[in-house]
Image (cartoon, rainbow, N blue to C red):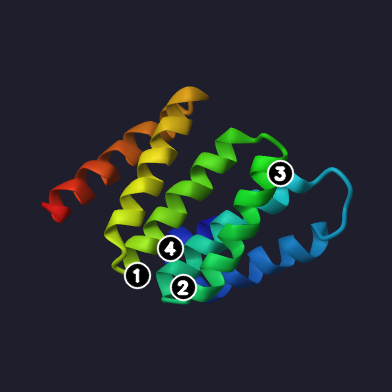
Amino acid sequence: GQVYAEEKDYEQAVSYFDQSLAVFSGAEGYDRVRTATKISLADVWLGTGQLREADSLLYDALAVAQKEEDWVLHSAALFYKGKLLERMNDLDSAYLFYEQALAEAQSVEVWTSVKEFALKLSDLAREMG
C-alpha cells in the first residue's frame, strides 16, 4: 500500500491498506501494525480529499498509540492530524499538532521524522505571519 501511496496510485493504495486492516482486524498483538496502517491510509485519504475518513482513522490511531504508549506512532499520527487541520484551514490548531508531534519525536529520538516535522512547523509559522 505504501508504494502505491508514494506513486499517488490511491485506488491501489486503499485496496492494499484495507486488505491489511482486514487481515489483522481482531488479531491479538497486532495493534502497532493496525495503527501504522491506519496512519498510512489516513495520509492517502488526505491526498484524495476524504478528510472525514482521514480524521476517523487518525482519531483511532492516536487513541491506540497513546494507550500502548507507542510514542513513535503517536508523533506520526499527531503530524498527520496537523496536516488534516491545515487542509481544513484551521492553521492555529494545525500548528499546535505539528508542535506536539515535533516535541514527541524529539523526546523519543525519532530523528528521521524530526526534520520533516520541524520544516512543516516552520513553513506553517511563516504562512501564518
User: Which one is earlier in the sequence, the residue at label 2 or at label 1?
Assistant: 2
Report the Cα–Cα distance between label 4 and label 2: 20 Å
The amino acid beneath tag 2 is Leu
Q: Residues within 10 Å of mark 2 (few under 14, many from 20)?
A: some
The amino acid beneath tag 1 is Met
The residue identified by callout 3 is 32
Q: Which residue is rendered at x = 87% and y = 58% of the image?
A: 26
Report the Cα–Cα distance between label 3 and label 2: 23 Å
Residue 49: image location, x then y, percent: 41, 76
User: Which one is earlier in the sequence, the residue at label 1 or at label 4?
Assistant: 4
126 left or right of 64 in image: left
Q: Residues within 10 Å of mark 1 (few under 14, many from 20)?
A: few
The amino acid beneath tag 4 is Glu
The residue identified by callout 4 is 7
Residue 78 visible in the displayed image = yes
Q: Which residue is rendered at x = 71% and y = 53% of the image?
A: 34
The residue identified by callout 2 is 51
Image depth: mark 3 or mark 1 in front? 1
Image depth: mark 4 or mark 2 in front? 2
Q: Which residue is rendered at x = 64% and y = 35% of the image?
A: 70
